[in-house]
Amino acid sequence: MKILSSLLWMRVTHALVIALAASLAHAQPIVPAEPGAFLMFLCQASDNSAAPHAPAYYQELFDPANPDMLDAYFKEMSFGKVSVKGSRVFGWFRLNVNSADLKARSNPTRHLTLAECIDAGVASLKAQGTPVDPSQWAGTIAIINVETDAGSVGNGIVGNAGEVIAFFQHEMIHAMGLNRHTHNLPDNAADDHVWGAPIQDVYNDPWDIMSFNRGQRSYQPPGGTHGFAGPTLNMAYRSLLNWVPAGRIANNLVTSDRGRKITTYNLIPVSEPQRPGTMAVVVALPGDVRYLVEYHRSTGYDRAVVRNEVVVREWRADQDTYLVRQTNGHIGYFAGEAPFIDTKNSLSITVQSMGSNGDTATVSVNTRLNKRQECQAQCRRTRDQCISDSRLPGHKRVQQCVREYAECLRGCSNLIDP
Ligand SMILES: [Zn+2]
Protein backbone atom coordinates (compact mmCIF):
# COMPACT_ATOMS: atom_id res chain seq x y z
CA MET A 1 0.00 0.00 0.00
CA LYS A 2 2.73 2.35 1.03
CA ILE A 3 4.86 1.41 -1.99
CA LEU A 4 1.88 1.83 -4.31
CA SER A 5 1.14 5.27 -2.89
CA SER A 6 4.68 6.54 -3.34
CA LEU A 7 4.81 5.13 -6.86
CA LEU A 8 1.62 6.97 -7.62
CA TRP A 9 3.10 10.17 -6.12
CA MET A 10 6.20 9.78 -8.30
CA ARG A 11 4.00 9.42 -11.35
CA VAL A 12 2.03 12.52 -10.47
CA THR A 13 5.18 14.60 -9.89
CA HIS A 14 6.69 13.27 -13.09
CA ALA A 15 3.60 14.28 -15.03
CA LEU A 16 3.71 17.72 -13.42
CA VAL A 17 7.35 18.21 -14.36
CA ILE A 18 6.60 17.22 -17.95
CA ALA A 19 3.61 19.61 -18.06
CA LEU A 20 5.73 22.42 -16.62
CA ALA A 21 8.56 21.78 -19.08
CA ALA A 22 6.06 21.75 -21.93
CA SER A 23 4.56 25.06 -20.82
CA LEU A 24 8.05 26.60 -20.50
CA ALA A 25 8.92 25.36 -23.98
CA HIS A 26 5.86 27.16 -25.32
CA ALA A 27 6.40 30.33 -23.28
CA GLN A 28 7.95 32.89 -25.54
CA PRO A 29 9.25 35.83 -23.58
CA ILE A 30 8.61 39.21 -25.15
CA VAL A 31 11.94 40.95 -25.56
CA PRO A 32 12.75 44.33 -27.13
CA ALA A 33 13.76 43.98 -30.77
CA GLU A 34 15.75 47.24 -30.59
CA PRO A 35 17.66 48.77 -27.66
CA GLY A 36 15.62 51.99 -27.65
CA ALA A 37 12.22 50.28 -27.66
CA PHE A 38 9.60 51.24 -25.04
CA LEU A 39 7.03 48.93 -23.44
CA MET A 40 3.50 50.36 -23.25
CA PHE A 41 0.75 48.83 -21.10
CA LEU A 42 -2.90 49.89 -21.26
CA CYS A 43 -4.65 49.69 -17.89
CA GLN A 44 -8.22 50.01 -16.64
CA ALA A 45 -9.49 51.19 -13.27
CA SER A 46 -11.02 48.39 -11.17
CA ASP A 47 -14.49 49.94 -11.58
CA ASN A 48 -14.33 50.98 -15.23
CA SER A 49 -13.92 48.54 -18.11
CA ALA A 50 -13.84 51.15 -20.91
CA ALA A 51 -11.19 50.58 -23.58
CA PRO A 52 -11.00 54.03 -25.27
CA HIS A 53 -8.79 52.74 -28.08
CA ALA A 54 -7.55 49.35 -29.26
CA PRO A 55 -3.86 48.51 -28.68
CA ALA A 56 -3.31 48.92 -32.44
CA TYR A 57 -4.18 52.62 -32.10
CA TYR A 58 -1.33 53.16 -29.63
CA GLN A 59 0.99 50.95 -31.66
CA GLU A 60 0.63 53.50 -34.50
CA LEU A 61 2.56 56.00 -32.37
CA PHE A 62 5.65 53.86 -32.88
CA ASP A 63 5.20 53.23 -36.62
CA PRO A 64 8.75 53.73 -37.97
CA ALA A 65 7.40 54.46 -41.46
CA ASN A 66 5.33 57.47 -40.34
CA PRO A 67 7.37 60.73 -40.34
CA ASP A 68 4.99 62.37 -37.83
CA MET A 69 5.28 59.62 -35.23
CA LEU A 70 7.76 59.02 -32.45
CA ASP A 71 10.47 56.95 -34.10
CA ALA A 72 11.09 59.46 -36.88
CA TYR A 73 11.00 62.33 -34.37
CA PHE A 74 13.59 60.82 -32.04
CA LYS A 75 15.83 59.75 -34.90
CA GLU A 76 15.89 63.34 -36.10
CA MET A 77 16.32 65.01 -32.70
CA SER A 78 19.17 62.61 -31.79
CA PHE A 79 20.91 62.76 -35.20
CA GLY A 80 20.21 59.05 -35.62
CA LYS A 81 21.41 57.96 -32.17
CA VAL A 82 17.98 57.06 -30.74
CA SER A 83 15.29 54.90 -32.29
CA VAL A 84 12.15 53.72 -30.50
CA LYS A 85 11.45 51.22 -33.26
CA GLY A 86 10.28 47.87 -31.90
CA SER A 87 8.26 49.44 -29.06
CA ARG A 88 5.31 47.23 -28.12
CA VAL A 89 1.82 47.87 -26.77
CA PHE A 90 -0.19 45.41 -24.63
CA GLY A 91 -3.56 45.65 -22.86
CA TRP A 92 -6.05 46.29 -21.59
CA PHE A 93 -5.21 45.09 -18.08
CA ARG A 94 -7.38 45.51 -14.99
CA LEU A 95 -5.94 47.39 -11.99
CA ASN A 96 -6.92 46.87 -8.33
CA VAL A 97 -7.30 50.63 -7.82
CA ASN A 98 -10.61 52.40 -8.60
CA SER A 99 -11.22 55.53 -10.68
CA ALA A 100 -11.78 57.82 -7.66
CA ASP A 101 -8.39 56.89 -6.24
CA LEU A 102 -6.74 57.27 -9.64
CA LYS A 103 -8.29 60.73 -10.03
CA ALA A 104 -6.94 61.76 -6.62
CA ARG A 105 -3.35 60.88 -7.57
CA SER A 106 -0.82 63.68 -8.08
CA ASN A 107 2.87 63.96 -8.84
CA PRO A 108 4.14 62.39 -5.57
CA THR A 109 1.88 59.35 -6.06
CA ARG A 110 2.22 59.10 -9.86
CA HIS A 111 4.84 56.36 -9.46
CA LEU A 112 2.19 54.10 -7.89
CA THR A 113 0.07 54.31 -11.04
CA LEU A 114 3.06 53.33 -13.18
CA ALA A 115 4.08 50.46 -10.87
CA GLU A 116 0.53 49.07 -10.54
CA CYS A 117 -0.07 49.11 -14.30
CA ILE A 118 3.29 47.47 -15.00
CA ASP A 119 2.60 44.80 -12.36
CA ALA A 120 -0.87 44.12 -13.79
CA GLY A 121 0.52 43.79 -17.32
CA VAL A 122 3.43 41.59 -16.31
CA ALA A 123 1.16 39.25 -14.29
CA SER A 124 -1.41 38.99 -17.06
CA LEU A 125 1.14 38.33 -19.81
CA LYS A 126 2.87 35.74 -17.63
CA ALA A 127 -0.45 33.94 -17.10
CA GLN A 128 -0.92 33.93 -20.89
CA GLY A 129 2.49 32.25 -21.28
CA THR A 130 4.21 35.31 -22.73
CA PRO A 131 6.41 36.68 -19.92
CA VAL A 132 7.98 40.12 -20.26
CA ASP A 133 10.70 41.79 -18.18
CA PRO A 134 10.15 45.60 -18.16
CA SER A 135 13.73 46.23 -17.02
CA GLN A 136 14.98 45.03 -20.41
CA TRP A 137 13.22 47.92 -22.17
CA ALA A 138 14.47 51.49 -22.61
CA GLY A 139 11.37 52.76 -20.80
CA THR A 140 7.82 51.91 -19.81
CA ILE A 141 4.55 53.74 -20.47
CA ALA A 142 1.30 53.18 -18.55
CA ILE A 143 -1.85 54.41 -20.29
CA ILE A 144 -4.83 54.66 -17.91
CA ASN A 145 -8.46 54.55 -19.14
CA VAL A 146 -9.76 57.06 -16.56
CA GLU A 147 -8.59 60.52 -15.57
CA THR A 148 -5.38 60.51 -13.55
CA ASP A 149 -2.25 62.58 -13.05
CA ALA A 150 0.07 62.12 -16.06
CA GLY A 151 3.76 62.69 -16.62
CA SER A 152 7.13 61.04 -16.28
CA VAL A 153 8.54 58.93 -13.46
CA GLY A 154 12.22 58.08 -13.96
CA ASN A 155 12.36 56.22 -17.26
CA GLY A 156 8.62 55.56 -17.08
CA ILE A 157 5.56 57.58 -18.09
CA VAL A 158 1.93 57.70 -17.01
CA GLY A 159 -0.52 58.94 -19.63
CA ASN A 160 -4.25 59.34 -20.07
CA ALA A 161 -6.05 57.54 -22.89
CA GLY A 162 -6.09 60.46 -25.33
CA GLU A 163 -2.59 61.93 -25.06
CA VAL A 164 -1.30 63.72 -28.16
CA ILE A 165 1.95 62.98 -30.00
CA ALA A 166 3.68 66.02 -28.47
CA PHE A 167 2.92 64.64 -24.98
CA PHE A 168 4.86 61.49 -25.79
CA GLN A 169 7.67 63.47 -27.44
CA HIS A 170 8.02 65.59 -24.28
CA GLU A 171 7.66 62.83 -21.70
CA MET A 172 9.88 60.36 -23.55
CA ILE A 173 12.67 62.97 -23.58
CA HIS A 174 12.34 63.02 -19.76
CA ALA A 175 12.37 59.21 -19.75
CA MET A 176 15.54 59.28 -21.87
CA GLY A 177 17.28 61.21 -19.10
CA LEU A 178 16.59 64.93 -19.56
CA ASN A 179 14.91 66.17 -16.38
CA ARG A 180 14.42 69.76 -17.61
CA HIS A 181 11.87 72.17 -18.97
CA THR A 182 12.31 75.37 -20.96
CA HIS A 183 11.56 78.86 -19.66
CA ASN A 184 10.53 82.19 -21.08
CA LEU A 185 12.27 85.32 -19.84
CA PRO A 186 10.67 88.73 -20.51
CA ASP A 187 13.21 91.52 -20.91
CA ASN A 188 12.78 94.46 -18.59
CA ALA A 189 15.02 97.01 -20.31
CA ALA A 190 14.22 98.46 -23.72
CA ASP A 191 16.78 97.51 -26.37
CA ASP A 192 19.04 95.90 -23.84
CA HIS A 193 18.85 92.39 -22.49
CA VAL A 194 19.82 92.01 -18.84
CA TRP A 195 21.43 88.66 -18.18
CA GLY A 196 19.77 86.57 -15.46
CA ALA A 197 16.75 88.83 -14.91
CA PRO A 198 14.60 87.17 -12.25
CA ILE A 199 11.17 87.21 -13.96
CA GLN A 200 10.64 83.94 -15.78
CA ASP A 201 7.92 81.55 -16.78
CA VAL A 202 8.60 77.85 -16.86
CA TYR A 203 6.99 76.03 -19.84
CA ASN A 204 6.48 79.21 -21.89
CA ASP A 205 9.09 78.70 -24.61
CA PRO A 206 6.87 78.25 -27.68
CA TRP A 207 9.82 77.11 -29.80
CA ASP A 208 10.58 74.04 -27.71
CA ILE A 209 9.02 70.64 -26.98
CA MET A 210 10.07 70.92 -23.31
CA SER A 211 7.36 73.57 -22.89
CA PHE A 212 4.70 71.09 -24.02
CA ASN A 213 1.12 72.34 -24.13
CA ARG A 214 1.73 76.03 -23.36
CA GLY A 215 1.12 77.79 -26.65
CA GLN A 216 3.86 75.95 -28.46
CA ARG A 217 4.44 76.01 -32.17
CA SER A 218 3.03 72.48 -32.58
CA TYR A 219 1.41 71.21 -35.79
CA GLN A 220 -1.42 68.86 -36.67
CA PRO A 221 -0.20 65.94 -38.81
CA PRO A 222 -2.36 65.46 -41.92
CA GLY A 223 -5.30 63.13 -41.32
CA GLY A 224 -3.87 62.21 -37.96
CA THR A 225 -5.97 60.93 -35.10
CA HIS A 226 -3.19 61.31 -32.54
CA GLY A 227 -3.33 65.08 -32.06
CA PHE A 228 -0.62 67.68 -32.45
CA ALA A 229 3.14 67.12 -32.66
CA GLY A 230 6.41 69.03 -32.26
CA PRO A 231 8.18 71.37 -32.21
CA THR A 232 11.89 70.56 -32.04
CA LEU A 233 14.10 70.18 -28.97
CA ASN A 234 16.66 72.96 -28.52
CA MET A 235 20.30 72.21 -29.31
CA ALA A 236 21.51 72.85 -25.73
CA TYR A 237 19.29 70.06 -24.42
CA ARG A 238 20.19 67.80 -27.32
CA SER A 239 23.84 68.28 -26.38
CA LEU A 240 23.07 67.42 -22.71
CA LEU A 241 21.66 64.13 -24.01
CA ASN A 242 24.90 63.55 -25.96
CA TRP A 243 22.97 63.53 -29.21
CA VAL A 244 24.86 66.23 -31.11
CA PRO A 245 27.70 65.26 -33.46
CA ALA A 246 30.82 67.38 -33.66
CA GLY A 247 30.51 70.49 -35.79
CA ARG A 248 26.76 71.03 -35.34
CA ILE A 249 27.20 73.54 -32.49
CA ALA A 250 29.76 76.35 -32.85
CA ASN A 251 31.29 77.50 -29.57
CA ASN A 252 32.15 81.17 -29.26
CA LEU A 253 34.28 81.19 -26.14
CA VAL A 254 34.94 84.69 -24.82
CA THR A 255 37.70 85.21 -22.28
CA SER A 256 38.06 88.25 -20.02
CA ASP A 257 41.07 89.59 -21.96
CA ARG A 258 39.16 89.65 -25.25
CA GLY A 259 39.59 92.30 -27.84
CA ARG A 260 36.98 93.48 -30.31
CA LYS A 261 35.91 90.46 -32.25
CA ILE A 262 33.14 89.88 -34.72
CA THR A 263 32.47 86.30 -35.76
CA THR A 264 29.97 85.45 -38.45
CA TYR A 265 28.07 82.18 -38.61
CA ASN A 266 25.84 80.68 -41.26
CA LEU A 267 23.16 78.78 -39.38
CA ILE A 268 20.95 76.16 -40.94
CA PRO A 269 17.50 75.75 -39.33
CA VAL A 270 17.28 73.40 -36.35
CA SER A 271 14.49 71.58 -38.17
CA GLU A 272 16.70 70.66 -41.15
CA PRO A 273 19.46 68.39 -39.80
CA GLN A 274 19.58 66.46 -43.08
CA ARG A 275 21.58 69.42 -44.42
CA PRO A 276 25.23 69.74 -43.40
CA GLY A 277 26.24 72.74 -41.33
CA THR A 278 26.13 74.55 -38.02
CA MET A 279 22.75 74.48 -36.25
CA ALA A 280 23.49 76.62 -33.19
CA VAL A 281 26.05 78.95 -31.64
CA VAL A 282 26.82 78.90 -27.93
CA VAL A 283 28.39 82.18 -26.83
CA ALA A 284 30.14 81.58 -23.51
CA LEU A 285 31.25 84.65 -21.56
CA PRO A 286 33.09 84.91 -18.24
CA GLY A 287 30.96 84.37 -15.13
CA ASP A 288 28.87 81.42 -16.35
CA VAL A 289 27.05 83.58 -18.89
CA ARG A 290 26.04 81.51 -21.92
CA TYR A 291 23.73 82.32 -24.79
CA LEU A 292 22.27 79.77 -27.19
CA VAL A 293 21.56 81.12 -30.68
CA GLU A 294 19.39 79.09 -33.08
CA TYR A 295 17.58 79.65 -36.35
CA HIS A 296 13.95 78.48 -36.50
CA ARG A 297 12.37 78.15 -39.91
CA SER A 298 8.89 76.96 -40.78
CA THR A 299 9.94 73.47 -41.91
CA GLY A 300 9.94 69.91 -40.57
CA TYR A 301 8.93 69.60 -36.91
CA ASP A 302 9.07 73.43 -36.67
CA ARG A 303 6.57 73.84 -39.52
CA ALA A 304 4.17 75.72 -37.19
CA VAL A 305 6.69 78.55 -36.73
CA VAL A 306 4.87 81.61 -38.07
CA ARG A 307 7.84 83.69 -39.17
CA ASN A 308 11.40 82.49 -39.72
CA GLU A 309 13.52 83.94 -36.94
CA VAL A 310 16.72 83.71 -34.95
CA VAL A 311 16.07 83.10 -31.26
CA VAL A 312 18.38 83.75 -28.33
CA ARG A 313 18.18 81.87 -25.06
CA GLU A 314 20.10 82.21 -21.85
CA TRP A 315 21.67 78.87 -21.03
CA ARG A 316 22.31 79.22 -17.34
CA ALA A 317 24.65 77.41 -14.99
CA ASP A 318 21.66 75.33 -13.78
CA GLN A 319 21.67 73.98 -17.40
CA ASP A 320 18.12 75.21 -18.11
CA THR A 321 17.39 77.47 -21.07
CA TYR A 322 15.46 80.78 -20.85
CA LEU A 323 14.05 82.14 -24.09
CA VAL A 324 14.52 85.91 -24.32
CA ARG A 325 11.36 87.91 -25.04
CA GLN A 326 11.92 91.52 -26.03
CA THR A 327 10.09 94.47 -24.48
CA ASN A 328 8.21 94.97 -27.78
CA GLY A 329 6.78 91.45 -27.34
CA HIS A 330 8.91 89.95 -30.11
CA ILE A 331 11.01 86.90 -29.45
CA GLY A 332 12.92 86.35 -32.64
CA TYR A 333 15.51 88.56 -34.32
CA PHE A 334 15.39 89.34 -38.02
CA ALA A 335 17.69 90.72 -40.71
CA GLY A 336 17.61 94.52 -40.90
CA GLU A 337 16.11 94.92 -37.43
CA ALA A 338 17.63 95.94 -34.09
CA PRO A 339 20.19 93.43 -32.83
CA PHE A 340 20.17 91.53 -29.57
CA ILE A 341 22.26 93.55 -27.10
CA ASP A 342 23.53 92.74 -23.62
CA THR A 343 25.51 95.86 -22.68
CA LYS A 344 26.55 94.58 -19.28
CA ASN A 345 28.31 91.64 -20.90
CA SER A 346 29.51 93.59 -23.95
CA LEU A 347 27.69 91.41 -26.43
CA SER A 348 25.60 92.00 -29.51
CA ILE A 349 24.10 89.50 -31.92
CA THR A 350 22.96 90.72 -35.32
CA VAL A 351 21.05 88.85 -38.01
CA GLN A 352 22.73 89.93 -41.25
CA SER A 353 20.51 88.05 -43.68
CA MET A 354 18.31 85.01 -44.09
CA GLY A 355 19.36 83.92 -47.54
CA SER A 356 17.18 84.44 -50.59
CA ASN A 357 14.45 82.03 -49.42
CA GLY A 358 15.17 81.78 -45.71
CA ASP A 359 17.29 78.65 -46.03
CA THR A 360 20.20 80.00 -43.94
CA ALA A 361 20.52 82.73 -41.30
CA THR A 362 23.77 84.67 -41.33
CA VAL A 363 24.41 85.86 -37.79
CA SER A 364 27.29 87.94 -36.47
CA VAL A 365 28.32 87.83 -32.84
CA ASN A 366 30.15 90.91 -31.62
CA THR A 367 31.94 90.41 -28.34
CA ARG A 368 32.89 94.03 -27.84
CA LEU A 369 30.41 96.85 -27.99
CA ASN A 370 30.40 99.90 -30.24
CA LYS A 371 30.42 103.44 -28.82
CA ARG A 372 26.65 103.70 -28.47
CA GLN A 373 26.48 100.35 -26.71
CA GLU A 374 29.40 101.27 -24.40
CA CYS A 375 27.54 104.51 -23.58
CA GLN A 376 24.39 102.51 -22.76
CA ALA A 377 26.42 100.21 -20.56
CA GLN A 378 27.76 103.24 -18.65
CA CYS A 379 24.19 104.55 -18.21
CA ARG A 380 23.20 101.19 -16.77
CA ARG A 381 26.10 101.13 -14.32
CA THR A 382 25.25 104.68 -13.19
CA ARG A 383 21.59 103.79 -12.76
CA ASP A 384 22.35 100.60 -10.81
CA GLN A 385 24.67 102.56 -8.48
CA CYS A 386 22.04 105.29 -8.06
CA ILE A 387 19.34 102.76 -7.18
CA SER A 388 21.52 100.98 -4.66
CA ASP A 389 22.52 104.36 -3.09
CA SER A 390 18.83 105.31 -2.85
CA ARG A 391 18.51 103.03 0.12
CA LEU A 392 20.69 105.49 2.08
CA PRO A 393 18.86 108.17 4.11
CA GLY A 394 18.41 111.50 2.33
CA HIS A 395 19.46 110.16 -1.08
CA LYS A 396 17.49 110.75 -4.25
CA ARG A 397 14.57 108.40 -4.85
CA VAL A 398 14.58 105.41 -7.20
CA GLN A 399 12.16 107.11 -9.63
CA GLN A 400 14.71 109.90 -10.13
CA CYS A 401 17.44 107.32 -10.91
CA VAL A 402 15.17 105.80 -13.55
CA ARG A 403 14.42 109.22 -15.10
CA GLU A 404 18.14 110.03 -15.24
CA TYR A 405 18.77 106.65 -16.85
CA ALA A 406 16.28 107.44 -19.64
CA GLU A 407 18.00 110.82 -20.22
CA CYS A 408 21.39 109.14 -20.27
CA LEU A 409 20.19 106.63 -22.90
CA ARG A 410 18.91 109.48 -25.08
CA GLY A 411 22.39 110.99 -24.90
CA CYS A 412 23.82 107.77 -26.33
CA SER A 413 21.43 107.52 -29.25
CA ASN A 414 23.49 109.60 -31.69
CA LEU A 415 26.72 107.70 -31.13
CA ILE A 416 27.60 105.26 -33.87
CA ASP A 417 29.98 102.39 -34.45
CA PRO A 418 33.55 103.72 -34.95
ZN1 LIG B 1 7.89 67.71 -18.43
Image (cartoon, rainbow, N blue to C red):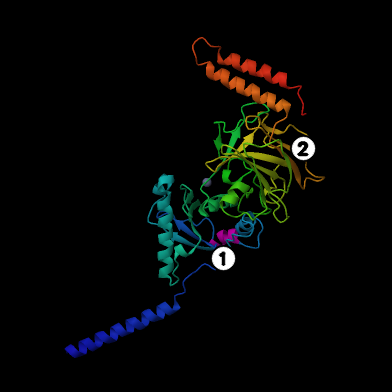
SS for callout 1: loop
Name the outermost residue toward the top.
394
How far separated are the C-alphas under marks 2 and 1?
Answer: 44 Å
> Which of disc 1 and disc 2 is earlier in sequence?
1
Answer yes or no: is residue 144 visible: no
Q: Which residue is located at x 78 percent, y 45 percent?
A: 358
Q: Quadrant of residue 330?
A: top right
Quadrant location of the N terminus in the rendered image: bottom left
- Which of these two is toward me, 38 or 3? 38
Q: Position of residue 106 (x, y in %)?
A: 43, 45
Q: Position of residue 241 (x, y in %)?
A: 56, 53
Residue 103 part of the magenta-drawn span: no
What residue is pinned by disc 2?
335
Could you classify mark 2 by the number of other residues whose Cα lies within 10 Å: few (under 14), some (14-19), or many (20 or more)?
A: some
Q: Is residue 314 above or below residue 248?
A: above
Q: Is residue 289 above or below residue 274?
A: above
Which kind of residue does numbered mark 1 sit on? Answer: Gly
Answer yes or no: is residue 61 visible: yes
Q: Is residue 367 above or below residue 235?
A: above
User: Is label 1's Cβ within 8 Å of ligand 1?
Assistant: no
